[in-house]
Amino acid sequence: MPLVLHAVSDGPPSIAVRMALKALNVDYKLVNVDFIKGEHMTEEYAKMNPQKEIPVLDDDGFYLSESNAILQYVAEKFGKDDRLYPKELKQRAIINHRLCFNLSTYYRNISEYVMAPIFFAYERTPLGLKKIHIALDVLNTYLERLGTKYAAGEYVTIADFQLITATMCLEAINIDFSQYQLVKKWYNTFKKEHPDLWAIAVPAMKEISDFEKLNPDLSHMNHPIHPVRK
Ligand SMILES: N[C@@H](CCC(=O)N[C@@H](CS)C(=O)NCC(=O)O)C(=O)O
């Protein structure tokens, strides 16, 4: 059975996993989950992931969700060396820290401000924007303290895939983050040094940008949490 990734075309966690699989040179089947049609909200989908979130990896019937866990799994399983997810204790701790920071704070704040109001009836608030700036400032500080080219060391790691795809959402709706100079430098370095990986993000960013202008119609959706725009 081939490896299967159930992914959404504009979802940063999905794009981060696709970057990792590409960097690892792994063959897999990509199954597009249509968020707008609510394909992730069916009982069938819940058998793979009761959280009803995208992405999900299916490794021969072993289902794994939560993109951080997927990144860790594929890097361990398919890495020919440990560059994407070094085994050395402190290096790994820093990567794990950055993944947690992304999940709890960086992408969380970005997704609440950028993504949620695109799809659902949420307003963008000054507090939401402030939270993004706080997260950017913290990332800038981490880059400054570590003094490395990438988020957790001199080489790209799975932590960068998450932080880069989160940052991509800011670019998608033209939020200027140039004052966070090390964030800007790191983001541009990734694009320049990993054009094949960045190419996976480009159509996702365009999709987010287009949705920002059009506001997709999700009025048919009966979402358990998010208020649907009528
Ligand atoms: N913590 C999850 C979050 C994934 C996530 O936010 N997925 C979004 C799409 S980008 C989703 O499935 N949302 C479901 C919904 O809002 O109904 C992960 O990292 O995999």
Image: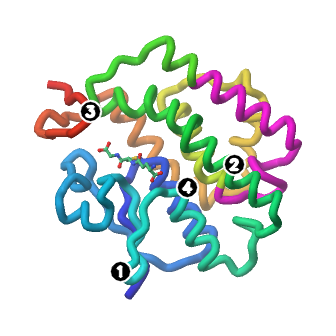
Measuring from the top left, give residue 59's x and y in whole percent: 43, 79
Q: Secondary structure at mark 4?
A: helix
Q: Secondary structure at mark 1?
A: loop
Q: Circle 1: is it few (<14), some (14-19), or many (20+) Cα within 10 Å?
A: few
Amino acid type at mark 4: Ala
The residue labelled by disc 3 is 226
Measuring from the top left, give residue 118's x and y in whole percent: 34, 30
Displayed quadrant of residue 163: top right
**Residue 4 shows in the view:** no
The residue labelled by disc 2 is 97
Displayed quadrant of residue 116: top left
The residue labelled by disc 4 is 199
CA–CA distance in space, label 2 to label 4: 26 Å
Asked whether 205 or 14 is in front, the reply is 14
The residue labelled by disc 1 is 61
Measuring from the top left, give residue 142's x and y in whole percent: 78, 37
* Magenta region: 132-158
Measuring from the top left, give residue 99's x and y in whole percent: 62, 50
At x 44%, y 14%, the residue is 125
Amino acid type at mark 2: His
At x 55%, y 44%, the residue is 103
Pointer 1 and pointer 3: residues touching (CB < 8 Å)?
no
